[in-house]
Amino acid sequence: MSENPIFADIYKISVALTTYNSQDYIEEQLYSILNQTISPYEIIICDDNSTDKTVFILENFAKSNKIIKIFVNNATLGVNMNFQQAISLCQGDYIALSDQDDVWKPEKLRTQLESILKLKDKREKGLLSVHDLSTISSTGELQLQSVYNNRRNKLEPRYTLLFANNYWGCTMLFNRALKNLILPFPEEIHAHDHWIALNAYCCGQIIVLKEPLIYYRRHDKNVSPLDMGPKPGLLIRIPLYFNGILKKDYFQSEINQLKALYNRHQNIINLNLTKKIKSVVNLHNKINLLRKIQFTILYRSKK
């Protein structure tokens, strides 16, 4: 239950949760969301036409929790479009994204909301709060206390976001201004969480919290991989480098996504980023080697 119901009423947080055949884990996740130190205003659940007992479990939860609202798709939309639907249905001032198989720590929503409320400009600009995460096995055993401490690349917002996403959707909480920027998702979308992070980076602000606020469950059905562990040796990295150059349409979907963002928001994009964005978008018809060189330059950038 909420420690401060008034606080939760003033700052209404919607949770956008998508499900698909999640009968094994959805109960534990819902309990963790319902037991936040500040209660969500609503939990919007979009089920992507599950074939197991997921919807039955959700409906039982909804009977005793009026804030749970369930929408079942007539046909499978896929991860990106299902999240778009869930986000579009949210009525709160802030939106937190949720996967179906994780476990939230009780202070997650409060900590992220407070990270945004500390900023002076909280209304007009698209604001995104992300955080560290712990990992657990399919049976709930702790694997890593901190993913951030095991990542090779930096987690602070930097130019590499133009090509590659550093943040997980399940760690995201953002304001209504960012919701208005990201919807509707473009046809060129590469990944919903990368699209959200790009919009915040180019047209707003990303707040990175070093606290692990969820238990991220790892199992054989995960959509998103984790990039961790020691840096591969040269014998591995060199073939990967050339395989990337030879790969058909290298970085093409990421370039298309960034082009869609630029075409939509060029009048409000951070001026410091405009030149970098154009340089990436202009790689649209360039050979893979030039794309690889540009990415390497961005990757080594201090920003």
Image (cartoon, helix red, strand yellow):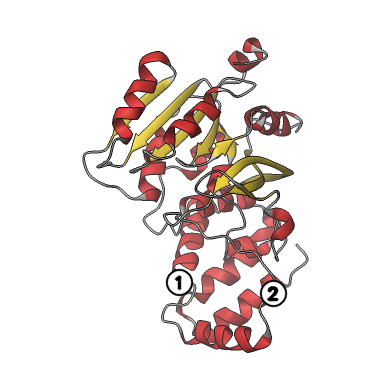
Work out whether 58 lies above or below 253: above
The tag on residue 252 is: 1
Do residues under tags 2 and 1 come within 8 Å of each other at their CB atoms? no
Q: Residue at x 60, y 64 (%)?
A: 227
Callout 1 secondary element: helix
For marks 2 and 1, give the one nearer the viewer. Answer: 2
CA neighbours of label 2 inside 10 A, class few (<14), some (14 to 19), many (20+): few
From the viewer's perspective, tell me whether residue 71 is left or right of residue 274. left
Residue 209: horizontal and vertical position, in percent? 73, 43
Residue 188: horizontal and vertical position, in percent? 40, 59
Q: Residue at x 47, y 74 (%)?
A: 284
From the viewer's perspective, tell me whether residue 70 is left or right of residue 102. left
Residue 249: horizontal and vertical position, in percent? 42, 77
Q: Residue at x 62, y 83 (%)?
A: 237
Q: Amino acid at mark 1?
A: Gln
User: Which image quadrant for residue 103?
Assistant: top right
Quadrant in the picture for the C terminus: bottom right
Find the distance from the CA under tag 2 to the CA under tag 1.
25 Å
Q: 181 or 71, which is in the foreground?
A: 71
Residue 90: horizontal and vertical position, in percent? 44, 29
Q: Amino acid at mark 2?
A: Lys
Callout 2 secondary element: loop
Q: Is residue 268 visible?
A: no
Q: Earlier in the sequence, mark 2 or mark 1?
A: 2
Q: Is residue 246 visible?
A: yes
Q: Residue at x 38, y 49 (%)?
A: 79
CA neighbours of label 1 inside 10 A, class few (<14), some (14 to 19), many (20+): some
List the residue tagged with mark 2: 231
Quadrant in the picture for the N terminus: top right
Work out whether 120 lies above or below 294: above
Residue furthest to the left: 74
